Amino acid sequence: MATTIIHRHRLATRLWHWVNAVCIIILIGSGLGISNAHPRLYWGRFGANFDHAWAQLPFFPAWLTIPAHYNLAISRRWHLFFALIFAFSLLAFMIVSLLNRHFQRDLRVRAQDVNAAHLAADVRAHLQFRFHDPETPGAYNALQKLSYVAIIFIALPLVVLTGLAMSPSMDAAWPWLLDLFGGRQSARSLHFIAMAAIALFTILHLVLVLLAGWRNELGSMITGRWKVPE
Amino acid sequence: MTRLIDRRGALLGGGAGMLLAGCDCVIQHSSARAILFKGEDIHRGLQRALSNRDALAPEFRPDQMSPYFRTNGTRDPGTAAYAALRAGGFADWRLTVDGLVARPLRLSLRDIGALPQRAQITRHDCVEGWSAIGKWQGPTLGSVLRAAGVRDAARYIVFTCADLYGGAPYYESLDRIDAFHPQTILAWAMNDRFLDTGHGAPLRLRVERHLGYKHAKYLMRVSAVASLDGIGKGRGGYWEDNVDYDWWAGI
């Protein structure tokens, strides 16, 4: 039986995927380094050592942080430089994906995707390591769509906006950021939670790439060409 | 199959690990460092281009203040000179205003209290991540600079303090946009009392759109200068010169 090859990922998607992957790793590493300077999280407008912290974070070890030793100034340099690339590449990807109809075509969640029976069937298929509908192998399955939509339209914008809300200068320019998140320390907590969600997504994403066949999946995100599983 | 997954896992995990380790390698190179450090200028440029340069930092109601406002940095300058000034209730303390000004000034606390005052309840954000809300009062830095007749050639305002770091006075600096911002004040009162030693008595800077280390405490001298060259190592502040903190601390 001849192998079918389809063109699965457009150039813009592939470019953004890799720029974003590098940014995410550097931002999480440097962010954990910044967290080590004051590993306590608060809700509300203010929060310091004598106020109630809802979470006491661990001191993240050197092998997880950038730089690989405690240096708040250098962690901030990495974080704030790559935050610019991360935020503007996300914005560019969103605009291009609306124009080239990637979002409308591939990520539109339809009512039939999210009815209970379909979702249950999709979960069963995942548990049997079947990730593609043989009739439309190029389409994303329902769980895939939902997780991509959650990461692209909720978690990534949330991490950008909560990051901006921590800037004292941005708070003067755009005070609505503070109203939106309920104060700077709430924004800082949400920034951490969004990071954790992105980290969890990344791990699941990598596991599923392995299970679906990493050569084909990785290759398709580089060349765009994807071999339809037989 | 299991063995293959292990190898693939190691490959992908190893890629991320190498990227992290690579970062430490990259920053050893001065050109890479220079690019990375440009982030500060890009943030400052973007924020100033896309928003109102005179935008006011949020102000809060008295019931929104921190119950306890922690101290940081120097808690007490601990020098004989400072101890003597404090023992005299700062009656002998003077703020020197000099540099590129038409009329150099030496202001007592009484002189500073006689200038038009501004009181504001604002949030203090430490670079470490914590925030505290407190009330500050004092004249605007702009009114002091105008009284001294600051010259157009002055592009930066440098603050020199009574506390010592590595044997030399702490110093910080602002450009004219932040120096003349309506919320940039020389505060002598905090939460309706005279400043205490831990918070910078007798006078400290409040520059509300910046992180805490810009808010120089124990002020002794305000100088208008054309350039930051020759001030410390030339990057405009003690932390900027010695541990790579951003000079523009708006983010």
Image (spheres, coloured by chain):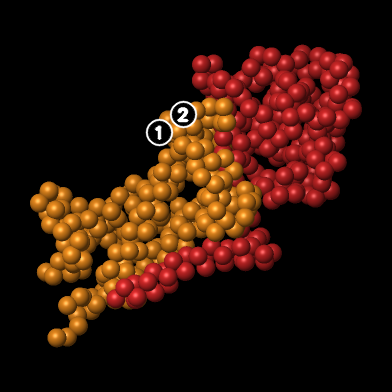
Chain colours: A orange, B red
Q: Residue at x 52, y 68 (%)?
A: B18
Q: Position of residue B30 (x, y in %)?
A: 69, 64
Q: Mark 2: few, some, or many residues within 10 Å (few <14, many ≥20)?
A: some
Q: Residue at x 60, y 46 (%)?
A: B44
Q: Residue furthest left?
A: A117
The amino acid marked with disc number 1 is: Leu
Q: Position of residue B166 (x, y in %)?
A: 82, 43
Q: Position of residue A90 (x, y in %)?
A: 41, 55
Query: Relative to A103, is A55 on the left or the right?
Result: right
For marks 2 and 1, give the CA distance: 12 Å
- As rendered, which of B81 and A18 lies closer to the eye? B81
Question: Quick check: B134 above or below B227?
Answer: above
SS for dot 1: helix
Q: Quadrant of the N terminus of chain A?
A: bottom left
Judging from the image, mark 2 belongs to the subunit labelled A
Question: Quick check: A217 above or below B46?
Answer: below
Q: Return the disc, 2 or 1, that comes first in the chain's sequence.
A: 2
Q: Quadrant of the C terminus of chain A?
A: bottom left
The amino acid marked with disc number 2 is: Gly
The quarter of the displayed image where residue B65 is located: top right
Q: Is residue A124 visible?
A: yes
Query: Relative to B55, is B144 on the left or the right?
Result: right
Whether labels 2 and 1 share one chain: yes
The quarter of the displayed image where residue B96 is located: top right
Tell us which disc is closer to us: 2 or 1: 2
On the image, numbered disc 2 is attached to which residue? A44
- As rendered, which of A36 and B204 lies closer to the eye? A36
- As rendered, which of B145 and B172 lies closer to the eye? B172
Judging from the image, mark 1 belongs to the subunit labelled A
Q: Residue furthest front?
A: B2
On the image, numbered disc 1 is attached to which residue? A180
